[in-house]
Image: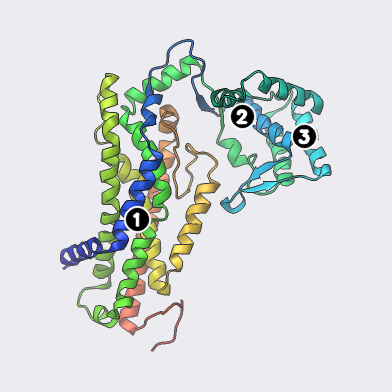
Amino acid sequence: MFGALFAKECKQILKSMVYYLYVAVFAMFVSSQLNGGAAEKMAEPVPGQESYGTTISHEEPAVMAGMLAGLMEETYRNSYATYPMGFYKGVTLSDAELAQMKSILEGCTGKGWETLVEEMESHFQAYNQRDIAGAMQAQIEYAVAPKESLAYGEFCKEMEKVCKLIGAGSSYSQEKIDAGVGVPMEYGQAKEEFDALCQKDRVTGAATRLFCDYAGIILSILPVFLGVTRCLRDKRAQVGQVVFSHQASAASIIGSRYLANVCMAFLPVLVIAALIQMPYQYHAKTLGVAPDVFAFLKYGCIWLLPEIMVVLAVSFFITELTENVISIFIQVFWAAASLFSSASLAGNFKLHLVARWNQIGGANEFWRQQQDLWRNRGFYFALSIALLIATFALYGKKRREGETIYGKIFKRRQ
């Protein structure tokens, strides 16, 4: 019974225009972000290069210097970027608040404001600001050293004062501090990262992580349209009572619908991931590395499948509960909040719906944080199962009592 229902649901999805729009939007989004340039960043570093890129540092002196550099630049412009509720908001301080901010910087560095300004301007003038590469290098290498007597705990307390002045969602919260800062990479570090890229990631693993980063952004929203479309199909066709009288259990009906949508939503993700991975398999061979040909499957199942599952589970539960499209707006808000509230574009997974790793390298750092990612995805896998069970119970109640809920959470029995 379940197998027949599952096959029927898959055929119905293949007849849906919404599904082909889902595939097209996903393919266009991912292909627009991954243009093949990532392979250029996989070259072996050589001594004497002008730049080796950046790496994330959690060392206390580096974190303090990086945070103070960012604070110095924003205070100089009196323009602070914040993300309350996940959305950008520029903050400009009053004269009194700006004076307090300058006092905090002076206290953390042991230098006067004029001296700090002179040092910052001198640093950036040493680089060709008209050249993008020069401007980026100047930004990467700019740091403001804290005074020697500044303890890390005292620094964190000063950043709390900064957050109170700027407001919620600033770049100086404890979460941002814990995420570390980007620092210039030296040759030894670059060589170590390249070796990890070849030995741990076998090239294709790093490329697939970048694919999962971009795919995770769009998959935090797209599957909800499949779920809502399926849940409202019976209502539009006015066959609710026919379905309710079906001999199959509520778990079989909802379970087959849900599983069919999960499989059909995940299938194009795997296909596109496999296609995008192919050039990197060739690149790995040019480096003398045996590529991990199943990287797209392993990362896809662990990284992206739980996200698809929970988005569909949310859409199924809320749509069965309300019988309207409100779950689309809820999902868009959740996805945006998760995307913009992340303290880092590479790691710091915690319980964010969208797991970010927006870089081609960083293999050692990723493997250090991989357990956090597995716990994150495990949580959303469990949440999707819990929501699915709740949907079983809700659907079963509607079948037993002959209730329909047209746009309301609660409704009198017809």
Q: Give me the residue at 27% from left, 65% from top.
A: 257
Q: Nearer the viewer, residue 369 or 77?
A: 77
**N-terminal-most mark, 2 or 3:** 2
Classify residue 247 as left or right of residue 205: left
Q: CA distance from mark 2 to mark 3?
A: 16 Å
Q: How many marks?
A: 3
Amino acid identity at mark 1:
Met
Instruction: Please state the horizontal and vertical placement of residue 104, each as a whole percent of the image.
Output: 77, 34
The local crowd at label 2, few if under 14, some if 14 to 19, many if 20 or more residues have their Cα within 10 Å, is many
Instruction: Please state the horizontal and vertical placement of residue 376, each as a whole percent of the image.
Output: 42, 46
Instruction: Please state the horizontal and vertical placement of residue 388, each as a whole percent of the image.
Output: 34, 63
The local crowd at label 3, few if under 14, some if 14 to 19, many if 20 or more residues have their Cα within 10 Å, is some
Q: Can you name the residue that lies furthest to the right here?
A: 96
Q: CA distance from mark 3 to mark 1?
A: 47 Å
Q: Give me the residue at 46% from left, 78% from top.
A: 408
Give the quadrant of the C terminus: bottom left
Q: Give me the residue at 59% from left, 39% from top.
A: 176
Mark drawn on residue 104: 3
